[in-house]
Amino acid sequence: MATRLYTHPIFLEHLTPPGHPERPDRLRAIERVLDDEAFSALDRVKAPEGDEKTILYAHPETFVECVRAAIPRTGIVSIDADTSASPKSWQAAVTAIGAANAAIDDVFEGRASNVFVAARPPGHHAEKTTAMGFCLFNTAAIAARYAQKKHQAERVAIVDWDVHHGNGTQDIFWDDPSVLYCSTHQMPLYPGTGAKSETGAGNIVNAPLAPRTGSDMFRDAFLSRVLPSIDAFAPDLIIISAGFDAHHRDPLAEINLTEDDFDWATGQLMERAGRHSSNRLVSLLEGGYDLQGLAFSVAAHVGRLMKG
Ligand SMILES: [Zn+2]
């Protein structure tokens, strides 16, 4: 079985204001790097249309309808200081959810050895009732609940190595011990949550990193906090909230990882997926705002996924 890649042209049509870091060119940079011959074995699939009803797995209907009502007919509207929507944003967000849920189906039904979803908008800052931090809906949270409802997964681990704390994912699973949420992130940094003391129902594991942290401390946090938590939890599925903004080139943060660190972390999670989850591993793009850092990091991540 091959590594599957979900993309869709609609992801380029979620528009943000000029100069905004979360821009369509991010996906173009990823497409370019994955066009290389080294990735010819990727099983490339156009994302299916998403099922809007699955948004309700992580968000109440009143909030979903608020977002729907905010989508403009023309132009770009602000949803908060740094989150915006354009006419195709709804379709992009729902298709991102469709891709993530299809990826869950793939790993449970044996159609892919693992899956990377290259979609936008990202999702991990979206709380139950708040769209924020470039995110409308929490795709990773919806996919985790989808795996539980459709495939009877009892325990799902979400590992979030985006440089920002996934406050939304933490919020959604705060009192739900069936989902383990592990995050490495810079602190202090937006959105301000993610202290070690935030532990939810014992299912939240935050590993904050000081500014200017490099490879050694990141790997140490993974080895000492994230991986032992996964081993103790023994998940049926691992979802990665794969943001690449902890790369040293990224303009939004001050963590100094290289693409080798993402290669390494991917390998560690694949090893855990093999040990606990029958290799079921789904990776969802979150942040990453330096186009070269993002492209190199995705290449390292996907290249490692393909090594099975
Ligand atoms: Zn981020």
Image: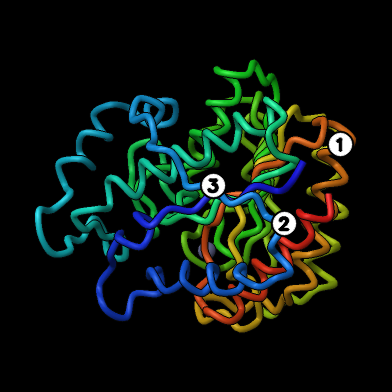
Q: Does the beta carbon at disc 3 come under 8 Å from ligand 1? A: no
Residue that lies at the very extreme toward the left in this rendered image: 73
The image quadrant of residue 86 is: bottom left
Q: Residues within 10 Å of mark 1 (few under 14, many from 20)?
A: few
Are the residues flagged by discs 1 and 3 in contact, CB closer than 8 Å?
Answer: no
Q: Is residue 15 above or below residue 281?
A: below
Q: Which mark is residue 205?
A: none
Secondary structure beneath disc 3?
Answer: strand
Question: How far is mark 1 from mark 3, CA to CA?
Answer: 32 Å
Residue drawn at x 62%, y 67% is 34
Residue drawn at x 74%, y 69% is 38
The answer to whether residue 305 is left or right of residue 159 is: right
In-front residue for pair 49/220 = 49
Task: Give the residue at mark 1.
Answer: 231
Of labels 2 and 1, the one closer to you: 2
In-front residue for pair 57/297 = 297
Of labels 1 and 3, the one closer to you: 3
Task: Give the residue at mark 2.
Answer: 41
**Horizontal and vertical percent position of residue 159:** 68, 47
Which numbered disc, 2 or 1, marks the residue that appears first in the sequence?
Answer: 2
Secondary structure beneath disc 1?
Answer: helix
Q: Is residue 178 visible?
A: yes
Residue drawn at x 65%, y 81% is 248
Question: How far is mark 2 from mark 3, CA to CA?
Answer: 12 Å
Q: Disc 1 marks which amino acid?
A: Asp
Which numbered disc, 1 or 3, marks the residue that appears first in the sequence?
Answer: 3
Secondary structure beneath disc 2?
Answer: loop
Task: Give the residue at mark 3.
Answer: 45
